[in-house]
């Protein structure tokens, strides 16, 4: 694969894991908090290792599917296997290259806020792996949700996963929530970047929301939350399009 930009930490991690089966992930928050999530193996896990929420999410998918933030393509590959026509979008050159190498037929570099510029109309949009967070903030959410509305058919489904940020007793997270409230932000808004070896990702906003907050964010859009399946702090929601 071609050399990657110094900012594509996520893609470099995906490439190394794909090529060598060994990598790690470091996520840095803008208050100095550093975390090592479950690891890159999660992004490559086969369906037999998925939890119930992910199986439910894919069962909700219908017709032509837009996989938002597809990464190295685990959901897209399974949907292709089930006979769906899938387009994956992402901003990481490395992750997209890995997805193509693994067999995802259609992968494009595209920000979710620009999804309305895609030529096709999709029956389902997926925001899995907590990727509802790609709305970024309460202010940006209407733009992203509007772009997905324009990119999908009149009776489309949006399948989105997130986590309830308030379902924690960790002081490091609770203090960050309070800091956000003082700024007039939702408590689950994060400003983060990924680091991997010599690669340092760009700072970006990511938003974790409780189901009731998701309902509030979509209230003034064409989307409405029809169903939620929750396991602890994590959940997946099925959103329907209204008139």
Image (cartoon, rainbow, N blue to C red):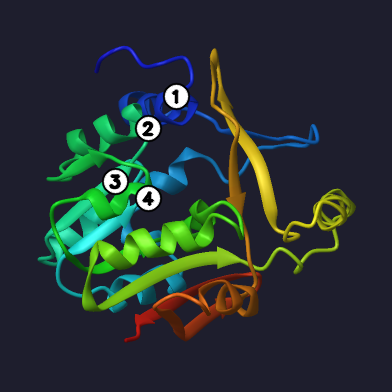
Question: Residue 8 shows which numbered tag?
Answer: 1
Which residue is depicted at the point 76% across and 67% down? 166
Circles 3, 4 touching at the beta carbon (< 8 Å): yes
Location of residue 79 by image quarter? bottom left
What is the tally of numbered marks visible in this picture?
A: 4
* SS category of the residue bearing label 3: strand
| Residue at screen point 70% across, 58% down | 188
Residue 176 location in percent, x, y? 82, 50
Q: Residues within 10 Å of mark 2 (few under 14, many from 20)?
A: many
Classify mark 1: helix, strand or loop. Answer: loop
How far is disc 2 from disc 1 in space, using C-alphas? 6 Å
Question: Between residues 85 and 111, which one lies in front from this camera angle?
Answer: 111
| Residue labelled with disc 2 | 92
- Circle 4 is placed at which residue position? 112
Residue 57 pos. (x, y %) = 37, 72
Q: CB atoms at circles 2 and 1 under 8 Å apart?
A: yes
Gap in Å between the C-alphas at discs 3 and 1?
15 Å
Q: Is residue 69 visible?
A: no
Labels 4, 1: front one:
4
- Which mark sits nearer the N-terminus, 4 or 1? 1
Between discs 3 and 1, the one toward the N terminus: 1
């Amino acid at each position: 694969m071609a050399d990657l930009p110094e900012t594509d930490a996520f893609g470099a991690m995906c490439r190394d894991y794909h090529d060598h089966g060994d990598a790690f992930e470091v996520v840095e928050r803008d208050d100095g908090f550093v975390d090592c999530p479950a690891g890159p193996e999660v992004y490559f896990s086969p369906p037999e290792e998925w939890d119930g929420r992910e199986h439910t999410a894919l069962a909700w998918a219908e017709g032509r599917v837009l996989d938002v933030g597809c990464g190295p393509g685990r959901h897209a590959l399974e949907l292709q296997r089930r006979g769906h026509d899938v387009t994956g979008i992402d901003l990481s050159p490395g992750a997209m290259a890995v997805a193509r190498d693994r067999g995802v037929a259609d992968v494009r570099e595209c920000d979710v806020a620009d999804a309305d510029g895609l030529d096709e109309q999709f029956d389902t949009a997926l925001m899995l792996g907590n990727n509802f967070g790609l709305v970024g903030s309460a202010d940006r959410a209407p733009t992203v949700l509007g772009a997905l509305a324009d990119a999908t058919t009149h009776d489309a489904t949006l399948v989105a996963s997130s986590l309830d940020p308030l379902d924690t007793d960790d002081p490091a997270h609770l203090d960050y929530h309070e800091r956000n409230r003082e700024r007039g932000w939702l408590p689950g808004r994060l400003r983060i970047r990924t680091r991997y070896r010599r690669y340092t990702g760009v700072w970006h906003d990511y938003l974790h929301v409780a189901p009731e907050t998701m309902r509030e964010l979509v209230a003034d859009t064409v989307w409405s939350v029809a169903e939620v399946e929750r396991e602890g702090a994590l959940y997946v929601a099925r959103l329907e399009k209204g008139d």
